[in-house]
Amino acid sequence: MSVKLFVSDIDGTLLVAGKNISAKNIEAVQKMTAAGIIVTIATGRMYRAALPIAEELGVNVPIITYNGALIKSTDGEIIHCEYLPPKIVVDVVNFFEARGWYLQSYSGDVLHYPEHCNFSEGYEKAQKVSGVAVGWDGLREKTADVCKLLGISPDAEENLKRIAEIKAAFGNKIDVTKSHPLYCEIICPGVSKAAAVKILAQKLKIDRAEVAAIGDSDNDLPMLKVAGTSIAMGNATDEVKAACDFTTGLCEDDGFAEAVRRLVFRE
């Protein structure tokens, strides 16, 4: 396939949770870059947590963060952003607090949560970031530049129930997606990795047919469907695998590097 833009998810695709990017995956990215292919990342992570990944890969390009709500270059230039309206932020905070559900926010690319707990600690460890406990009133006050809100559930079944309840309550005022079985991610309507890929490809003057994308989770689906070539990780959900042109190996087995080797360079 002829690829000019290669877009990759991070967690479960490039990176095993809690670990560094493998040497094989870094080598695969650098080989594409040397061949003139633009390689970027599209992630649900906050910009501050995604930037070290881009730097480790050695790419100096715009990166897609917050599930597409923010496209920002590695040197700090904002290409595109969509923030949740302050009133919606307050309404969602109230909704979660009333039900005793965990919620965290990212005002100004800073992680905030009501209080330090197992959920916040696990997230900080996995993302290699530190947050600030501000209380529920603090979440209601920090409404500026909020790209997304993130709820974390104790188990996958409970998360699906919560997502359904949130959708019923807020309707088309928000979009809800998940990048992890326990995560409930709340973003502006129309925000997605797919929309961000379209914006970035247009800016770079690259046709959709020349875009390849790889991922593993439900929040990757729109991006994978819009790409000219779509690749599912071996550890991807069944829905992701069904939607993709190809399936590669598992994340822990460097399935990303395998996909680049087989599908980009035909080795």
Image (cartoon, rainbow, N blue to C red):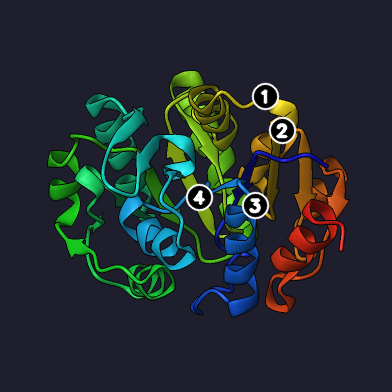
Q: Residues within 10 Å of mark 3 (few under 14, many from 20)?
A: few
Is the C-beta separation of discs 1 and 3 under 8 Å? no
- Which residue is disc 3 drawn over? 35
> Depth-wise, is mark 1 or mark 3 nearer the camera?
3
The front one of 267 and 92 is: 267
- Which residue is disc 4 drawn over? 43
Alpha carbons under labels 2 and 1: distance apart:
5 Å
Alpha carbons under labels 2 and 3: distance apart:
14 Å
Q: In this view, does 39 lie above or below 30?
A: above
Screen quadrant of the C terminus: bottom right
Residue pictured at 19% horizontal, 51% vertical: 136
Is the C-beta separation of discs 4 and 3 under 8 Å? no
Dividing the picture into quadrants, the one containing residue 14 is: bottom right
Amino acid beneath label 4: Thr
> Depth-wise, is mark 2 or mark 3 nearer the camera?
3
Dividing the picture into quadrants, the one containing residue 124 is: bottom left
- Which residue is disc 2 drawn over? 210
- Which residue is disc 1 drawn over? 207
The location of residue 150, given as percent across then percent down, is 40, 49
